[in-house]
Image (cartoon, rainbow, N blue to C red):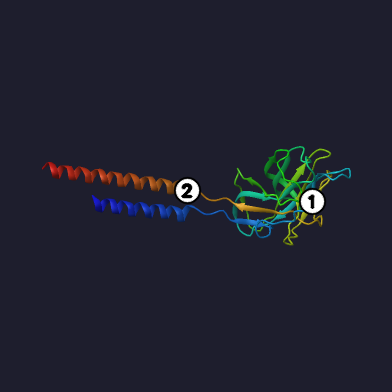
């Protein structure tokens, strides 16, 4: 029985190790223009919302994955221009490309009013997790866009501080203008961490069932020997 328990533990460990190697992977960075420690330009950014010049602006920044990856989350540096200036919901989109400008929306998020820190402070990047986990294709251009409606509502998409100059787009309500020549805002796109595949979980369950059956047979055999 002791030998069996040792073998069972060894087999169980091998199964767990196999599962971990074959079906788990840590999230990886698909794109980032943050500096070390998620740094960015805390004092300047591109206006999202009321530009106080008669127009309401949306901003878009592009990125191109270098490898195929499942989209897991977005981290983005956004700040209120002045206290209370995020007076309505801020909309963030992941979009496809349409002629080097933001195109069809692939996934969208909405943030509550007042959820951002004030411009000039080292605010933690906003983290938006994907619920769709779309596959992003290597070499394909995608866009992250930010928009905020209503006069008097203004948010800044803080500039990156790493020299990134991927195409940036701006929309004043008449359509996207790209490339705008503006400094891109700071953001990071991360892949999703994988989970055990159903086939792997099924195999693990079969292993448990098999070892349990073996235990019962050994127990029955031992009982028969003692009774005789």
Extreme-right residue of the structure: 53
Q: Position of residue 90 (x, y in %)?
A: 73, 41
189 versus 88 height, above or below: below
Q: Position of residue 84 (x, y in %)?
A: 78, 39
The residue singled out by tag 2 in the image is 197
Q: Residue at x 35, y 48 (%)?
A: 207
Position of 127 with respect to 217 (left or right) is right
Marks 2 and 1, how far apart at CA: 42 Å
Q: Position of residue 53 (x, y in %)?
A: 89, 45
- Circles 2 and 1, Cβ within 8 Å, touching? The answer is no
Q: Indicate which label's residue lies in the foreground, 2 or 1.
A: 1
114 versus 19 height, above or below: above
Q: Residue at x 68, y 59 (%)?
A: 35
Q: Tell which of 143 and 37 is nearer to you.
A: 37
Q: How many marks?
A: 2
Query: Could you classify mark 1 by the number of other residues whose Cα lies within 10 Å: few (under 14), some (14-19), or many (20 or more)?
Result: many
Position of 132 with respect to 83 (left or right) is left
Q: Residue at x 23, y 44 (%)?
A: 217
Q: Secondary structure at mark 1?
A: strand
Q: Position of residue 104 (x, y in %)?
A: 71, 45
Q: Tell which of 68 and 195 is nearer to you.
A: 195
Q: Residue at x 36, y 46 (%)?
A: 206
The residue singled out by tag 1 in the image is 46
Q: Secondary structure at mark 2?
A: loop
Q: Quadrant of the C terminus?
A: top left
């Amino acid at each position: 029985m002791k030998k069996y328990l040792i073998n069972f533990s060894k087999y169980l460990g091998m199964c767990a190790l196999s599962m971990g190697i074959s079906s788990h992977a840590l999230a990886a960075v698909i794109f980032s223009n943050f500096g070390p420690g998620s740094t960015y330009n805390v004092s300047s950014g591109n206006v999202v919302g009321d530009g106080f010049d008669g127009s309401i602006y949306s901003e878009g920044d592009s990125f191109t994955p270098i490898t195929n990856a499942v989209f897991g989350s977005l981290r983005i540096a956004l700040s209120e221009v002045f206290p209370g200036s995020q007076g309505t919901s801020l909309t963030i989109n992941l979009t496809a490309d349409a002629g080097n400008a933001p195109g069809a929306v692939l996934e969208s998020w909405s943030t509550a009013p007042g959820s951002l820190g004030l411009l000039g402070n080292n605010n933690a990047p906003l983290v938006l997790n994907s619920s769709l986990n779309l596959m992003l294709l290597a070499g394909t251009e995608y866009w992250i866009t930010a928009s905020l409606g209503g006069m008097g509502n203004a948010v800044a998409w803080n500039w990156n501080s790493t020299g990134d100059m991927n195409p940036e787009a701006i929309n004043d309500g008449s359509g996207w203008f790209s490339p705008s020549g503006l400094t891109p805002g700071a953001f990071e796109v991360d892949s999703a961490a994988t989970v055990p595949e159903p086939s792997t979980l099924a195999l693990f369950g079969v292993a448990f069932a098999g070892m349990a059956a073996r235990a019962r047979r050994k127990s029955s055999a031992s009982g028969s020997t003692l009774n005789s």
